[in-house]
Image (cartoon, rainbow, N blue to C red):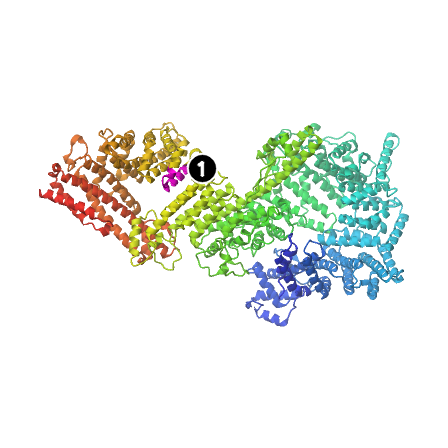
């Protein structure tokens, strides 16, 4: 197979070998396959085809064919660029065209300049080379370094690497290290070649620098290769030759060149040491080849004129010597030869002489290991270098020959040196590294000691178990006769004490049992001797203090360094006992003649004791105040009369003259350590004000102006000052009282008392806020700039100190900006916020922000990002400022590079606050909503020079954070490491889609085929198993949030996407397909769901699974309990209440609480603040406890802290679970609500969602909050399921619709419905619940009952359906009939009743409890639930349950109370309105469902008495005129609500009238009628006002009430003898006005809305029916006879009913019957012919019904016809109802007339009346059954009888 592309190879290698988790089996297989495939590329490392004449001709012809690609046409620019690449990179022309194609795919080259295209293509080529070299390096490193990987895998890799080295890979590496440095096309390029290329960021990079980095990586590979397969003789000689070439050209200021040289050097060292230590006999060692040994020995012993080359050769000579010695020993042992060859021994001794002459030890230490280049090299490589330096020196020190040589050079050193021969300027600082280029000045023995110390200082763990080392140490410490060797030896001991084991060993060595003169007693005795000597000198008035001998000072400094290391690294429990008396360390500090560097060493050793124990810390404070130099604070404007030798004097007069400041530095470090350990911060640092003034005014103020002999001391001094400032800012908070106190005393004052009142933290912040000395100095440190810092860091040994100084400076800026705003509010205008001060010079802001590019120390990047966050929130024009100074482009690229590096990093960052990637993403999220243009817009490459909303985002064309985020979200690589980054990236995209300015550009980008809102990750991320809680809970939490933000983004896309756009439509379909599995559209182009390069999935299996249900399964788990169990001791001490009080306080730690808000917004316990509270509590209890109880209390508090940590994690997990579930619910609800039409099998999908949601709700793992969310989803699905019932069925291949479509295929099966109800009942009766949750569940239950009870559209009567079905089924044997559907509905109702009855007790108990004791909203919906239960009741089961619980009586009582209360303004009525309405609904349901039995039950409970006590007229009471307008409006609302409840009251009373017809007349009169009549009398005013409403202008509500009042009175008022209420006259007046009306001309039925007209007409004729029924009762029951016309009745001026009125009504009914019958006939015919109508005609029908909102322009003709059919059926149903009512009215009227015609007294006057009546009857006779849709046989018989009577009357 062809070698994999370098980028893919690197990705495979990194995933398998750099991940913190072991590689999976799939990764292992992929890695091994990739290695085998890449073997040719490794063998020919960086070897590419050269230019070729034929290929050049092909390119010049402008048409090139690349492998696996169609022919490519080039333009002139392409040809020119390709040929330039070929000439300057020595590449084949076709390969150059491939580079251009790849570059265009990566960055889009359209519109770029030719030079830019060249640089991008060249940069891409170098990136490919880098990826290949990096892959090789990672492979070699994984084999060499023990990374805990599988041994079998490592063996496979090692075997393949060895095979590659066997065929010349290492020789190729050696050649490349040499040849890449040449000025030729295959190297660094000709002088005339283009010097720069563009890297992956689009930034300029020098070609020479790129090649140097390649050479460095190759040198690392060369060094690692020596550990896998030893070099051969030729490879060794070639490597040695390259080493000399590199050493001759090396420049100490060029770190990369030095590192290359070190790589070549250590490849030889590793080879020789590995060969020397090898025990394998299979391969001969290098010296066994005598010719090679002679040749190489001559090479290493040959004199060279270049001292640098000589130094490197000396190190090689050292390793060569070790190899010769050990090889000779092995040969001697194997051959049993006693005496070694004299030639080999001579070579060994000659090498040893050269080593000592050149002092290779000093060169290795000073010019290699101590250089910045060595320290800044790759950590793993430095570890390997140091490890082999350790092996080299151990071999050297342990060999007898070398021991003889060491003895020789030790004696020479002892004899050659005077005890006090060191020059003064050298001893000022023992740590100054020599950088002399001349001959070494130190003795080889001293250099040897220092070298050994340097090795173990870098890797202290190498000391463990190293007996050869300790043997050498014992020998080296004997019989020192001069200071230099003693100092070197003690320096070695100090480095060996850098670990706990080493510290213990060194402490024992110096106890006095090993050495005679070197020990702890020597140190302390010497200090005491000099203290006594100086004390006597002071007591003598004539003599001055003697000078301190330099040699003794040197030795004391070295001793103190050992003491410091031993105390710092000793075992915490053991070191307390080692040095019980530390007072001698303090006694020399106050003497003027003690050298400052000795004072510095004394204080450094004292500092080590500060952390040993609190007692020692207090002792240090005490001794320091007793012995050390004072810090005299001089107020401004004052001068001391006499000069005092204090710290100020020593600094300014002694150390400044020496240009060395060890005493001041050590003093600052000591006080910083002491202050840091202080726990009592109540005085806000006032007691340290003198120290702060000294640091602020005397040390840091003039710090930049001082001269420094050693640049390290400059930055050490600055670092100590900055650490002091940081302590001040971190330890002490500023309260309002402190600010106002400082403000009141801020006037000028010179007294010491005023200084003591000052607060260090306030003074420091004020300095920054007015730009004084501290601000200027720290700003000048920052203004060094990132480029200078990088250069100093990589080339100078003090670079690390400068780096720390910059870091602390940035931290101080952050700490000040956390406090300055509070002060600025008080101290303006003298003190301004820091951002205002910084804005005075834009260069200051830019300097702070540019440090994001500094990647050597992530903490500096973090600080820069945090400063950006603060400034972006304060400076509105920050983006314009950056644009103006032309730094925006570099800043965009720096942030993107920082984010990309974090994404590519394999290191797991435990503390998310230290994650630069998270900080950048949070910065982007926080700035989204800030005024445009903001930092988010800038860093994501929006068009900040124009309207943001019109930006066209092009992430491929511009390197930015957006490109990095999108690329990484597309791959979602390293999910375990980058989980937080993926989480916040999804959140960022969601917030961008939500923001009104950015939503357009971002959604346009994300909707493209490449991304499609990352819906593909529903499967890759969404449904993948969660990590185990006990393994990685943080990852578990983050992955939940990832899924949540992804689902939120998908929900938003589904909600706002405009699917009229093809791009958005494809994206929506992709989302639905990836989440729900099936879309209605035939997605023939399956690639639209695939990202480029992804294989197309054509199967229908996994692609079509419903991932939504799997997502719900993911989030279903029980979170751990967060409750706390107190330890027994805390219970005994009764401190639980105090702890609970602490935890109940919701304040954050800044305001005295123990909480903080995480980056996700979760309120968590601040462990540090909680710990401090527990410590305070412990101190309060300290005196009450015994020692054992104190230990137990400490353990108990430790247990509390562990609980708090678990509480935080568990709370975060709960929040993440709810977040994901909320997002899931949003996705489901939006898809169901807005995009349901795009899904297939909708009813089944909705059922699955309902079933899953209810199942999850009833699970014991489901919390109340989760159940609430799931219930909301179920409510949405149930509502959509009800709507889906009446939506046009899909799946048909034809456009015709039938009546069967109305009732078919939409109802879930009875079994499915039963399953839903069962799970819903289980959810309602779950143990853990709340009223809020139950309210939602009750709503769902009501929705379910509505679904089950509405198989047919409520506006389509069964008679119409039945008629149409009979029409359609003629000749068809179709089983689907209306009777079958109705039967199934009946069976479903019975099944529902049976299911609820099983849990009836629990359900009714819950519902009644909420109905009686719940909230207002809970009561209302609970009564509605009881209403629905009654509606499905059988055998009066639920009625009996309610009666037994007294619910019905409670309802009646509540309703009475609601109406009877005064109408004074109160919110109580508004709150109880819904409850009252629900209670009326329940009462009405009882009377309706149980009929007369129900009415009797209510009457027996005194329903009418309760209703009679209702204050129905309360709304008519006048309010006080003094009430304001708002109160009047509120009252008006209350009155309207109360008025609306009169209708339910009237409905209930109406239902009671059903008992009138069935009761015995006398019984009725005595009981039922009497009560209803009394009710009517008690509410006379409301009845009268309703009866006297103007019908022509009445609304539907008024007509309904009028209809009910008429119905009530028509049933009972005829039994009342006394008409004192004038109801009869009101009824008669209404008859006169209504019966004679022309109904077609009324305003209320002349609305443009035909449907409203039809409903109003139905109500009016219903009113007529009530009135005519009253007349019917009067005429038939009470034998009342009416006059013929109005003129015949003038009695008392009262209106009486007349036969003329009846005739007019009959005429109106006749006309209406003819018209309505014809309308119904036409409507049904139109239904039959609907499938033949055009789309325009169908739309007209829909328009008549005003249902245009039910269709969209994209809906097909079948859906339109379906909607039109429903509309026509509804209209036909209305006409059918009206026909029924009209026939009833006509029958009553005919009966009344018939009674009068048969009454002889009346008949004789009816002849004239008969003339008018006869035509009406004839027209009634002509009514056709086919038009009316009724059997008119009996009706025609009644008409014929009346007609005959009328004819006879005419004849008479």
Q: Residues within 10 Å of mark 1 (few under 14, many from 20)?
A: some
Q: Nearer the viewer, residue 138 or 180?
A: 138
| Residue 238 relative to residue 521: left or right | left
| Residue 645 relative to residue 1449: left or right | right
Q: Nearer the viewer, residue 1798 or 395?
A: 1798
Q: State whether residue 198 appears in this view.
A: no
Callout count? 1
Q: Quadrant of the C terminus?
A: top left
Residue found farthest to the bottom = 54
Q: Quadrant of the N terminus?
A: bottom right
Magenta span dominant secondary structure: helix
| Residue 707 relative to residue 1778: left or right | right
Quadrant in the picture for residue 1197: top right
Image location of residue 872, percent across then percent down: 58, 44
Q: Nearer the viewer, residue 56 or 1538?
A: 1538
Q: Residue at x 87, y 58 (%)?
A: 349
Judged from the image, the secondary structure of the residue bearing numbered disc 1 is: helix
Does the magenta-highlighted stretch encompass residue 1421? yes
Image location of residue 519, percent across then percent down: 85, 41
| Residue 1341 relative to residue 937: left or right | left
Quadrant in the picture for residue 645: top right
Does the magenta-highlighted stretch encompass residue 982? no
Task: Specify start and end residues of the magenta stretch as a single range.
Answer: 1420-1439
Residue found farthest to the right = 415
Q: State whether residue 495 appears in this view.
A: yes
Image location of residue 784, percent across then percent down: 68, 47
Image location of residue 1455, percent across then percent down: 37, 32
Residue found farthest to the left = 1852
User: Residue at label 1?
Assistant: 1406
């Amino acid at each position: 197979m062809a070698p994999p592309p370098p980028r893919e190879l690197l990705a495979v290698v990194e995933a398998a070998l750099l991940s913190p988790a072991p590689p999976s089996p799939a990764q292992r297989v992929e890695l091994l396959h990739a290695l085998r495939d890449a073997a040719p590329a490794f063998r020919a490392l960086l070897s590419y085809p050269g230019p070729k004449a034929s290929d050049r001709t092909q390119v010049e012809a402008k048409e090139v064919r690349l492998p696996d690609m169609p022919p490519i046409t080039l333009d002139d620019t392409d040809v020119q660029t390709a040929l330039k690449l070929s000439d300057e990179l020595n590449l084949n022309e076709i390969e150059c065209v491939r580079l251009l194609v790849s570059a265009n795919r990566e960055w889009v080259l359209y519109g770029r300049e030719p030079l830019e295209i060249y640089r991008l293509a060249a940069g891409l080529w170098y990136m490919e080379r880098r990826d290949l070299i990096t892959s090789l390096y990672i492979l070699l490193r994984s084999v060499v370094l023990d990374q805990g990987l599988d041994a079998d895998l490592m063996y496979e890799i090692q075997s393949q690497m060895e095979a590659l080295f066997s065929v010349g890979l290492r020789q190729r590496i050696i050649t490349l290290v040499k040849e890449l440095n040449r000025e030729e096309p295959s190297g660094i390029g000709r002088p005339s070649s283009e010097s720069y290329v563009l890297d992956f960021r689009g930034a300029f990079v020098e070609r020479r620098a790129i090649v140097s980095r390649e050479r460095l990586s190759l040198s690392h590979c060369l060094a690692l290769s020596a550990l896998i397969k030893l070099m051969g003789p030729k490879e060794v000689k070639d490597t040695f030759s390259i080493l000399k070439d590199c050493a001759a050209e090396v420049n100490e200021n060029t770190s990369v060149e030095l590192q290359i040289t070190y790589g070549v050097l250590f490849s030889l060292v590793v080879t020789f040491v590995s060969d020397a230590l090898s025990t394998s006999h299979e391969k001969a060692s290098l010296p066994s080849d005598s010719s090679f040994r002679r040749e190489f020995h001559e090479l290493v012993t040959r004199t060279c004129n270049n001292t640098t080359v000589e130094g490197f050769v000396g190190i090689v000579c050292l390793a060569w010597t070790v190899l010769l010695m050990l090889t000779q020993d092995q040969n001697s042992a194997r051959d049993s030869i006693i005496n070694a060859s004299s030639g080999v021994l001579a070579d060994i001794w000659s090498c040893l002489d050269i080593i000592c002459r050149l002092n290779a030890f000093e060169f290795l230490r000073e010019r290699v290991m101590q250089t910045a280049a060595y320290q800044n090299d790759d950590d793993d490589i430095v570890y390997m270098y140091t490890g082999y330096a350790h092996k080299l020196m151990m071999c050297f020190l342990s060999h007898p020959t070398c021991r003889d040589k060491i003895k020789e050079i030790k004696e020479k050193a002892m004899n050659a040196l005077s005890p006090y021969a060191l020059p003064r300027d050298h001893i000022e600082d023992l740590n100054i590294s020599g950088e002399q280029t001349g001959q070494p000045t130190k003795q080889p023995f001293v250099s040897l000691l220092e070298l050994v110390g340097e090795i173990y200082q870098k890797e202290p763990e190498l000391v463990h178990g190293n007996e050869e080392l300790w043997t050498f140490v014992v020998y080296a410490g004997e019989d020192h006769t001069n200071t230099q060797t003693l100092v070197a030896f003690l320096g070695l001991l100090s480095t060996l004490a850098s670990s706990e084991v080493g510290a213990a060993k060194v402490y024992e060595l110096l106890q006095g049992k090993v050495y005679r003169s070197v020990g702890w007693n020597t140190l302390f005795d010497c200090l005491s001797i000099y203290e006594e000597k100086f004390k006597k000198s002071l007591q003598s008035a004539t003599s001055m203090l003697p000078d301190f001998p330099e040699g003794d000072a040197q030795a004391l400094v070295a001793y103190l360094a050992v003491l410091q290391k031993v105390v710092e690294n000793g075992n915490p429990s053991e070191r307390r006992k080692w040095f019980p008396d530390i007072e001698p360390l303090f006694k020399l500090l106050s003497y003027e003649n003690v050298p400052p560097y000795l004072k510095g060493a004394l204080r450094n050793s004292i500092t080590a004791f500060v952390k040993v124990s609190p007692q020692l810390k207090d002792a240090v404070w005490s001794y320091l105040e007793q012995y050390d130099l004072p810090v005299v604070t001089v107020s401004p404007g004052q001068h001391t009369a006499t000069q005092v030798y204090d710290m100020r004097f020593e600094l300014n007069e002694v150390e400044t003259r020496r240009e060395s400041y060890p005493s001041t530095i050590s003093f600052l470090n000591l006080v910083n350590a002491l202050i840091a350990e202080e726990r009592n911060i109540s005085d806000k640092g006032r007691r340290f004000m003198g120290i702060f003034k000294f640091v602020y005014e005397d040390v840091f103020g003039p710090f930049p102006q001082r001269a420094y002999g050693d640049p390290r001391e400059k930055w050490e001094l600055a670092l100590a000052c900055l650490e002091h400032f940081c302590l001040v800012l971190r330890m002490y908070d500023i309260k309002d009282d402190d600010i106002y106190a400082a403000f009141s005393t801020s006037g000028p004052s010179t007294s010491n008392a005023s200084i003591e009142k000052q607060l260090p933290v306030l003074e420091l912040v004020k300095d920054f806020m007015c730009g004084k000395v501290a601000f200027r100095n720290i700003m000048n440190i920052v203004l060094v700039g990132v480029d200078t810092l990088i250069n100093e860091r990589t080339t100078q040994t003090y670079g690390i100190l400068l780096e720390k100084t910059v870091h602390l400076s940035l931290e101080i800026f952050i700490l000040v900006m956390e406090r300055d705003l509070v002060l600025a509010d008080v101290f303006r205008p003298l003190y301004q916020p820091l951002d205002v001060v910084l804005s005075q010079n834009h260069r200051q802001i830019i300097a702070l922000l540019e440090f994001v590019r500094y990647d050597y120390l992530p903490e500096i990047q973090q600080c820069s990002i945090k400063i950006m966050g603060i400034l972006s929130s304060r400076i509105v024009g920050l983006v314009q400022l950056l644009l103006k100074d032309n730094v925006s482009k570099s800043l965009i690229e720096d942030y993107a590079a920082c984010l990309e590096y974090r994404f590519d990093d394999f290191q797991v960052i435990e503390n998310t606050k230290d994650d630069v990637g998270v900080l950048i993403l949070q910065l982007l999220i926080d700035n989204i909503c800030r005024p445009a243009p903001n930092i988010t817009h800038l860093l994501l490459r929006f068009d900040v020079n124009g309207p943001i909303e019109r930006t066209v985002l092009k992430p491929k064309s511009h390197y930015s954070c957006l490109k990095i985020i999108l690329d990484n979200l597309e791959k979602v690589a390293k999910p375990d490491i980058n989980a937080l980054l993926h989480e916040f990236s999804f959140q960022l995209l969601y917030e961008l889609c939500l923001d009104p300015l950015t939503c357009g550009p971002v959604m346009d980008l994300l909707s493209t085929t490449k991304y499609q809102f990352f819906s593909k990750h529903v499967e890759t991320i969404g449904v993948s198993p969660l990590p185990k809680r006990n393994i990685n809970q943080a990852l578990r939490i983050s992955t939940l949030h990832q899924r949540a933000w992804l689902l939120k983004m998908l929900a938003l896309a589904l909600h706002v996407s405009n699917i009229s756009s093809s791009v958005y439509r494809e994206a929506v379909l992709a989302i639905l397909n990836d989440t729900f599995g099936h879309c209605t559209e035939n997605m023939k182009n399956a690639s639209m769901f695939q990202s480029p390069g992804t294989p197309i999935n054509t199967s229908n299996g996994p692609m079509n699974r419903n991932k939504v249900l799997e997502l719900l399964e993911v989030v279903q788990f029980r979170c751990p309990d967060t409750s706390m169990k107190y330890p027994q001791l805390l219970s005994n001490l009764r401190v639980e209440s105090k702890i609970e009080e602490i935890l109940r306080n919701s304040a954050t730690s800044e305001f005295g609480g123990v909480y903080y808000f995480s980056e996700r917004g979760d309120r968590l316990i601040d462990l540090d603040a909680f710990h401090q509270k527990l410590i305070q509590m412990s101190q309060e209890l300290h005196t009450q406890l015994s020692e054992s109880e104190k230990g137990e209390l400490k353990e108990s508090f430790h247990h509390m802290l562990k609980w708090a940590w678990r509480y935080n994690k568990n709370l975060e997990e709960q929040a993440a679970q709810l977040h994901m579930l909320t997002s899931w619910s949003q996705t489901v609800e939006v898809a169901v609500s807005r995009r349901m039409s795009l899904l297939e099998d909708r009813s089944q999908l909705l059922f699955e969602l309902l079933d899953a949601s209810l199942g999850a709700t009833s699970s014991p793992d489901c919390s109340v909050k989760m159940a609430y969310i799931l219930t909301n989803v179920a409510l949405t699905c149930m509502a959509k399921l009800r709507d889906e019932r009446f939506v046009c069925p899909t799946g048909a291949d034809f456009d015709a619709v039938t009546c069967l479509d109305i009732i078919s295929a939409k109802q879930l099966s009875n079994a499915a419905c039963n399953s839903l109800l069962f799970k819903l009942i289980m959810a309602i009766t779950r143990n853990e619940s709340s009223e809020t949750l139950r309210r939602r569940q009750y709503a769902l239950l009501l929705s379910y009952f509505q679904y089950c009870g509405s198989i047919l559209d409520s506006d389509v009567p069964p008679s119409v359906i039945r008629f149409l079905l009979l029409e359609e089924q003629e000749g068809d044997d179709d089983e689907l009939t209306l009777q079958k559907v109705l039967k199934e509905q009946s069976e479903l109702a019975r099944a529902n009743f049976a299911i609820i009855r099983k849990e009836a007790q629990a359900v009714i108990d819950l519902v009644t409890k909420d109905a009686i004791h719940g909230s207002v909203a809970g009561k209302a919906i609970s009564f509605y639930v009881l209403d629905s239960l009654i509606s499905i009741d059988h055998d009066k089961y639920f009625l009996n349950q309610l009666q037994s619980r007294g619910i019905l009586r409670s309802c009646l009582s509540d309703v009475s109370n609601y109406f009877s209360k005064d109408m004074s303004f109160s919110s109580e009525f508004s709150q109880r309105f819904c409850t009252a309405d629900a209670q009326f609904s329940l009462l009405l349901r009882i009377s309706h469902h149980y009929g007369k039995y129900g009415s009797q039950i209510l009457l027996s409970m005194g329903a009418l008495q309760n209703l009679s006590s209702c204050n129905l007229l309360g709304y008519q009471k006048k309010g006080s005129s003094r009430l304001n307008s708002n109160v009047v409006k509120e009252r008006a609302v209350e009155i309207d609500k109360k008025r609306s409840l009169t209708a339910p009251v009237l409905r209930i009373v109406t239902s009671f009238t059903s008992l009138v017809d069935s009761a015995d007349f006398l019984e009725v009169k005595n009981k039922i009628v009497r009560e209803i009549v009394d009710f009517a009398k008690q509410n006379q005013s409301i009845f009268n006002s309703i009866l006297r409403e103007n019908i022509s202008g009445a609304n539907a509500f008024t007509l309904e009430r009028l209809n009910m009042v008429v119905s009530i009175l028509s049933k009972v008022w005829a039994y009342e003898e006394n008409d004192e209420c004038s109801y009869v006259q009101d009824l008669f007046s209404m008859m006169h006005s209504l019966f004679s009306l022309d109904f077609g001309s009324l305003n209320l039925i002349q609305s443009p809305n035909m449907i409203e007209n039809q409903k109003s007409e139905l109500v009016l004729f219903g009113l007529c029916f009530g009135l005519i029924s009253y007349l019917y009762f009067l005429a038939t029951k009470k034998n009342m006879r009416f006059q013929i016309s109005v003129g015949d009745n003038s009695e008392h001026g009262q209106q009486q009913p007349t036969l003329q009125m009846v005739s007019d009504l009959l005429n109106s009914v006749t006309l209406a019957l003819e018209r309505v019958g014809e309308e119904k006939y036409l409507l049904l015919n139109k239904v039959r012919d609907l499938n033949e109508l055009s789309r325009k005609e169908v739309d007209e029908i829909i328009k008549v019904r005003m249902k245009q909102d039910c269709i969209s322009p994209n809906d097909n003709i079948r859906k339109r016809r379906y909607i039109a059919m429903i509309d026509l059926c509804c209209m036909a149903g209305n006409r059918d109802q009206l026909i029924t009512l009209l026939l009833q009215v006509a029958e009553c009227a005919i009966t009344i007339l018939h009674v009068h015609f048969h009454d002889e007294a009346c008949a004789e006057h009816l002849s004239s009346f008969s003339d008018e009546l006869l035509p009406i009857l004839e027209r009634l006779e002509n009514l056709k059954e086919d038009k009316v849709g009724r059997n008119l046989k009996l009706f025609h018989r009644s008409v014929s009888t009346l007609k005959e009577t009328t004819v006879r009357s005419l004849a008479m």
